[in-house]
Image (cartoon, rainbow, N blue to C red):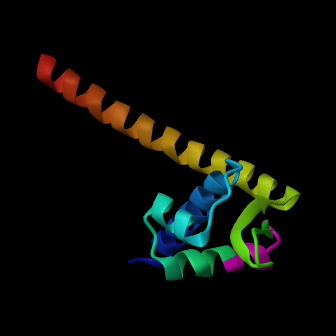
Amino acid sequence: MRNTDQIHNTKEDIFNILRLLSSGENLSQRDVSMHLGFSLGKTNYLLKSLMRKDLIKIKNLIFGDNKAKKIKYFLTKKGLKEKINLTYHFLQIKEIEYNFIKSEWNALADHEHN
């Protein structure tokens, strides 16, 4: 895989995590992993990376025996801005892809009519 493909995939993974975490649900790492189809190790790595970049924070929810049973991840202001930027980025990519496919479709339709 080319380096630019890896960067695009990582951006997309981060975007998907930020979208999921902005839902407000109390999700464990395992929940995030299952929702997005990532391995638990990849999920752990990405969540820690997002915390280091101050895009997300965590809050332990304690239930009995003073043990954290669930963790709530939430977006920081910086994380919300990043989600907005990534949303815009991926919308631009999808628009380019749509226009390209539409022009191919029109070319095929024109060729069929001639």
Instruction: Between residue 61 and residue 46, name the one nearer to us.
Output: 61
Locate residue 106 relative to residue 17 in the image: left or right. left
Instruction: Between residue 107 and residue 87, name the one nearer to us.
Output: 87
Q: Quadrant of the C terminus?
A: top left
Q: Position of residue 94 (x, y in %)?
A: 49, 43
The reply to whether residue 70 is in sight is: yes
At 13% across and 22% down in the image, what residue appears? Answer: 112
At 57% across and 57% down in the image, what residue appears? Answer: 16
At 38% across and 77% down in the image, what residue appears? Answer: 1
The reply to whether residue 114 is in sight is: no
Locate residue 1 relative to residue 83 in the image: left or right. left
Residue 114 sits above or below residue 41 on the image: above
**Magenta-colored span:** 48-55
- Is residue 51 in the magenta section? yes
Quarter of image, res 74: bottom right
Q: How many marks?
A: 0
At 20% across and 29% down in the image, what residue appears? Answer: 108
Locate residue 5 relative to residue 83 in the image: left or right. left
Instruction: Between residue 49 and residue 7, name the one nearer to us.
Output: 49
Q: Position of residue 80 (x, y in %)?
A: 79, 53
Magenta span: predominant SS is helix
